[in-house]
Image (cartoon, rainbow, N blue to C red):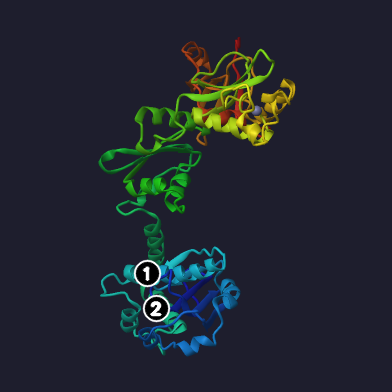
């Protein structure tokens, strides 16, 4: 029989092993029940584990060393197994165990097997919470499931499958669906976290705040879809331990809606500076950046110099890159040096000594330092290497207004000049007020990047207004 409420296609899997250690022990038998639109298909095979099965386990499962000796190795049935499992919800009793063993077998073949999981132990715990014990043994006894060979893979898979069918019958659609949903939430959400908080988040752009115990602010983020972005924090495989920590400590989430992406960026940047959340500290939130400019020496060779900037210079002088630290700027110069065989002395990576630079000694620098290359040749190579880092020249005569409009029709005009934000207003009548308060233009790398993409992209949806009386 097919499932009524459990999702299909799915596979109910059970394995027998040489022991309980997922790293050292190996699979001796695998049983798979496939439930698809076409019906229910059973399959199982013994597997030669290339390892000894202990007396105790032979007695428990009835699978002996002689039996597996003639059986195929995992790699011989791997393709067949993969065809059965791929693209289907992977279900097992204590699913982490079976999934872990199968994943390890595949990874020995250099294949990264991944699947969405469901656990029948957890289903039983949710649906039969008042009952005592949720081992397969207890479930078989409780629901009077008929099993021929306990501890053989296919028989145990059948027992789990029958349990699910019985649960559907006894508990009905609503409870079964709640049990499924509960399982996914519990898996991805941190303990002590009220999942209903997510339900209250809007699908619109803005800034969100993660709060921890005792109302301390953990993290501020921005997105064009707050709800989707917050969900991704909790459901993604955590890329870093920092991200994991944030999720585990979060007890509450609040948000501020904005009319669009630019105002979300600006608000995020301001709030991070003002509220100093614990986990934003190290992030790109510096107010001083480092950029590179070229200085011509008396010999006519251009030499890159790193200098700090916090305000956008008004001169038309060419700048290369916005780096969060002096070190990052230096690394960029070094990699350009390597790629274009430039001289360490000229590029400020070493003090000139009057002799060959260390790069030339390694036959990398083309030898400006020892007179083997002309200044002009070095200049051309350097400009070539720096080219992609060049900051764009502001393409307008003066400030512009970027008009954001959200779904409800609310508008924000963001006044921008020379890649920096001057201020906001919600009506064009107030442009002059905002402009009159204009102070030094603070650089923000995220805002610079956003503006470059928006202004130079042909299919940008952003509405740009020239400001009247533009001087
Ligand atoms: Zn050199």
Where does residue 181 sit, x and y in percent of width and height? 41, 61
Where does residue 242 sit, x and y in percent of width and height? 40, 45
Along the viewing direction, whichever of 71 and 130 lies nearer the viewer = 71
Could you tell me which residue is drawn at 38 percent across and 74 percent down? 20
Q: Left or right: 71 with respect to 339?
A: left
Up-down relation of residue 367 to residue 177 (above or below) = above
Where does residue 378 sit, x and y in percent of width and height? 71, 25
Mark linked to residue 414: none
Up-down relation of residue 377 to residue 224 (above or below) = above
| Residue, disc 2 | 163
Could you tell me which residue is drawn at 43 percent across and 67 percent down? 118
Q: Left or right: 218 with respect to 464?
A: left
Pointers 2 and 1 in contact (C-beta within 8 Å): yes
Instruction: Please identify the quarter of the rendering in which residue 303 is found.
Output: top right
Q: Could you tell me if residue 395 is visible in this image?
A: no
Mark 1: which secondary structure? helix
Q: Residues within 10 Å of mark 2 (few under 14, many from 20)?
A: many
Q: Residue furthest front?
A: 355
| Residue, disc 1 | 123
- In the picture, the quarter occupied by the C terminus is top right
- Spatial distance from mark 2 to mark 1, Cα to Cα? 10 Å
Q: Left or right: 337 with respect to 89?
A: right
Instruction: Please identify the quarter of the rendering in which residue 182 is found.
Output: bottom left
Could you tell me which residue is drawn at 48 percent across and 63 percent down? 116
Instruction: Please identify the quarter of the rendering in which residue 127 is found.
Output: bottom left
For marks 2 and 1, the one nearer the N-term is 1
């Amino acid at each position: 029989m097919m499932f009524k409420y459990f999702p299909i296609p799915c596979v109910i899997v059970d394995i027998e092993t040489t022991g309980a250690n997922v790293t050292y022990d190996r699979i001796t038998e695998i049983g798979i029940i496939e439930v698809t639109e076409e019906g229910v298909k059973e399959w199982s095979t013994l597997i030669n584990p290339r390892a000894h099965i202990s007396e105790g386990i032979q007695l428990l499962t009835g699978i002996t060393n002689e039996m597996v000796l003639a059986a195929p190795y995992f790699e011989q049935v791997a393709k067949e197994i993969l065809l059965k499992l791929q693209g289907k919800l992977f279900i097992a009793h204590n699913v982490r165990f079976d999934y872990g063993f199968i994943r390890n077998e595949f990874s020995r073949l250099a294949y990264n097997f991944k699947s969405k999981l469901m656990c029948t132990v957890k289903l039983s715990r949710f649906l039969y919470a008042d009952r005592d014990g949720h081992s397969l043994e207890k479930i078989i006894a409780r629901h009077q499931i008929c099993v021929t060979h306990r501890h053989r893979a296919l028989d145990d898979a059948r027992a789990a499958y029958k349990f699910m069918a019985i649960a559907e019958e006894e508990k009905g659609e609503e409870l079964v669906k709640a049990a499924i949903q509960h399982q996914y939430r519990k898996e991805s959400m941190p303990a002590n976290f009220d999942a209903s908080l997510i339900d209250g988040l809007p699908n619109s752009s803005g800034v969100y705040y993660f709060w921890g115990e005792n109302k301390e602010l953990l993290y501020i983020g921005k997105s064009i879809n707050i709800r989707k972005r917050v969900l991704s924090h909790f459901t993604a495989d955590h890329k870093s331990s920092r991200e994991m920590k944030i999720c585990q400590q979060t007890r509450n989430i609040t948000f501020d809606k904005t009319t669009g992406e630019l105002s979300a960026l600006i608000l995020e940047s301001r709030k991070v500076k003002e509220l100093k959340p614990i986990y934003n500290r190290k992030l790109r939130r510096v107010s001083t950046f480092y950029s590179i400019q070229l200085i011509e020496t008396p010999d006519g060779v251009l030499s890159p110099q790193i200098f700090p900037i916090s305000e956008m210079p008004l001169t038309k002088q060419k700048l290369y890159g916005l780096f969060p630290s002096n070190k990052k700027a230096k690394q960029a110069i070094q990699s350009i040096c390597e790629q274009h065989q430039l001289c360490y002395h000229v590029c400020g990576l070493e003090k000139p000594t009057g002799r060959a630079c260390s790069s030339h000694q390694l036959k990398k620098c083309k030898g400006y330092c020892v007179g083997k290359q002309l200044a002009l040749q070095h200049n051309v190579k350097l400009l070539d290497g720096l080219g992609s880092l060049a900051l764009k020249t502001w393409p307008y005569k003066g400030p512009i207004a970027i008009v954001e409009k959200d779904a409800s029709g609310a508008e924000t005009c963001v006044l921008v000049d020379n890649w920096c934000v001057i201020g906001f207003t919600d009506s064009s009548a107030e442009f002059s007020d905002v402009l009159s308060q204009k102070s030094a233009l603070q650089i923000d790398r995220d805002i610079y990047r956003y503006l470059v993409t928006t202004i130079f992209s042909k299919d940008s949806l952003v509405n740009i207004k020239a400001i009247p009386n533009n001087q």
